[in-house]
Image (spheres, rainbow, N blue to C red):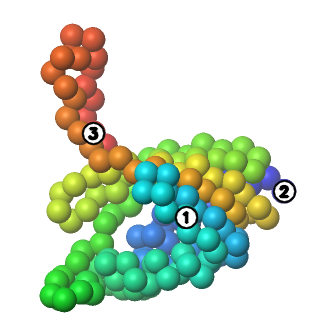
């Protein structure tokens, strides 16, 4: 069976925008690595825990009414995830997502993943915030509008 990487990733991003669990998209023993922070998420239960305790609100939360947990209750508006690119063939793939936060910041999120039985079994995530192009490079580069 050939994996439809685009369909899988579209469902993944849609689930993130709904603050939904990713149970149908990841294996029970999924391993997710964040090399930049050194964190490793092992298993679907731990992934569910992260989603449930996200400052953006629990599963199915309405972004307009989600409340953050902490000493001072503050209104939190969830980030918006926009799929930019999907590449994949066989059991491996990658995708790029733009994450737009309510504070106006934008980040790039790149995920490299491996599939087992049509679900993500292992993935490595990289996050990078936008930055302005340095002036010293201007003679040699074109600066395109950010997506």
Secondary structure under badge 3?
loop
Whole-number angstrom distance, CA of label 1 to CA of label 3 = 30 Å
Which residue was labeled with disc 3? 146
Give percent across and percent down for residue 1. Answer: 84, 56
Whole-number angstrom distance, CA of label 3 to CA of label 2 = 37 Å
Question: Which residue ends up furthest to the right in the rendered image?
Answer: 1
Given residues 95 and 130, the one toward you in this image is 130
The reply to whether the C-beta atoms of the residues labelled 3 and 2 are less than 8 Å apart is no
Secondary structure under badge 2?
loop
Q: Which mark is residue 1?
A: 2
Residue for point 66% across, 68% down: 30
Is residue 6 visible in this depiction of the protein? no
User: Between tags 1 and 2, which lies in front?
Assistant: 1
Residue for point 62% across, 77% down: 44
Mark nearer the N terminus (1 vs 3)? 1
Give percent across and percent down for residue 53. Answer: 40, 83
Quarter location, residue 16: bottom left
Give percent across and percent down for residue 94. Answer: 58, 47
Is residue 141 visible in this depiction of the protein? yes
Q: In screen coordinates, is 46 left or right of 145?
A: right
Given residues 56 and 7, the one toward you in this image is 56
Residue for point 29% across, 47% down: 129
Mark nearer the N terminus (3 vs 2)? 2
User: Between tags 1 and 3, which lies in front?
Assistant: 1
Q: Which mark is residue 40?
A: 1
């Amino acid at each position: 069976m050939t994996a439809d990487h685009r369909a899988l990733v579209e469902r993944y991003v849609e689930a993130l925008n709904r603050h939904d669990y990713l149970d149908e998209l990841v294996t029970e023993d999924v391993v997710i690595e964040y090399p930049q922070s050194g964190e490793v998420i092992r298993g679907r239960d731990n992934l569910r825990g992260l989603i449930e305790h996200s400052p953006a609100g629990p599963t199915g939360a309405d972004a307009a009414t989600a409340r953050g947990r902490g000493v001072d209750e503050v209104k939190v508006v969830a980030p918006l995830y926009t799929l930019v690119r999907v590449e994949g063939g066989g059991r491996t793939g990658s995708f790029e997502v733009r994450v737009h936060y309510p504070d106006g910041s934008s980040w790039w999120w790149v995920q490299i993943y491996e599939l087992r039985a049509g679900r993500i079994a292992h993935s490595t995530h990289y996050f990078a915030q936008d930055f302005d192009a340095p002036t010293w490079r201007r003679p040699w580069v074109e600066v395109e509008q950010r997506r």
